[in-house]
Image: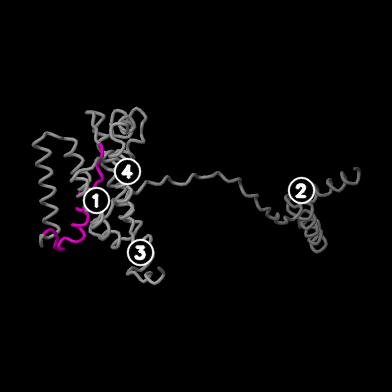
Amino acid sequence: MNGHRDWSGPSEEHQPVTWWNGHPIFASHLIVIVYCVLMVVTAIGGGALAPMLSLLDFESRLVWSGEAWRLMTYGLFNYPSLQFGFDMLMLVWFGRELERTFGRRVFFVLYGSIYLIGPLVLSMIGLWRPTAMAGEPGALALFVAFATQFPGMPIFFALLAKWAAFILVGLFTLMALASRNWTALVLLWSTCGYAHLFVRHQQGSISLPRFSWRRRPPKLRVLPDLPAKKIAPVAKPAKDDATMAEIDALLDKIAKSGMASLTPKERAKLEAAREGLMKRGRG
């Protein structure tokens, strides 16, 4: 089996999940196997399984009342029919090509979202008008995804994939309108429209909108005041030093020119200095 591991693809995402008798088994094959096994169980069980199946079918009223599992189980159990066989063939053929193109993970996201988008939309509509459905594997939406990726590939007697998708979607639309089956119409367009947009997004033709949330400005913090720098005081001449310098100058003047050379202001300074000296001596 290891000799077959040279399957085309850049990584394990594009390779088969496993092998059986030398044949590759992709994820799309596993999905079909699960559907077919559950179909056989449904066919054999018959009416005995009816009470259980009623607990798994989708009903918007019951979903909103808390039975959310119905969003996941509505399409698992199907009765044998030509429509079911045709759906399984579409899942095998076209699902396999999409898986080999996008990889296993993207394929699971595509098919899982196709499976869930229908009941989610119908649940929202169920807020105004009750809706219900069962047994919808989503094969047509998967084919629309294939036709979006390979629009020019010939299928169905050389009919191009894009025209086959238009014909099938248009035919099922007219059938739903003729029978006034609004649930089937909403399911058809929601799943097929989503599948088309999903592939276009993978191709890079459309991009999802980006929301730029407005950021709040950072909160300002009040910081404590910085300690004030101590400025060294400028040394000022002492009053006594200034007075003694003046007295010395007056004494020099008296020594040179006599007491009569002093002005009345200078005499007052000399007298004040004398009295200050006398007070210090007494203290």
Disc 4 residue type?
Answer: Leu
In the foreground, 60 or 78: 78
Describe residue 259's horizontal placement relative to residue 87 as left or right.
right
Residue 21, label in figure: 3
Q: Earlier in the sequence, mark 2 or mark 3?
A: 3
Question: Which residue type carries mark 2?
Answer: Ala
Q: Residues within 10 Å of mark 4 (few under 14, many from 20)?
A: some
The image quadrant that residue 188 belongs to is top left
* Magenta-drawn segment: 134-156
Percent of width and height locating residue 109? 33, 52
Mark 4 or mark 2: name the one nearer the start of the chain.
Answer: 4
**C-alpha gap between disc 2 and disc 3:** 132 Å
Q: What residue did someone put label 2 on?
A: 268
Q: Dot 2: what SS?
A: helix
The quarter of the picture where residue 96 lies is bottom left
Considering the image in quadrants, where does the N terminus appear? Answer: bottom left
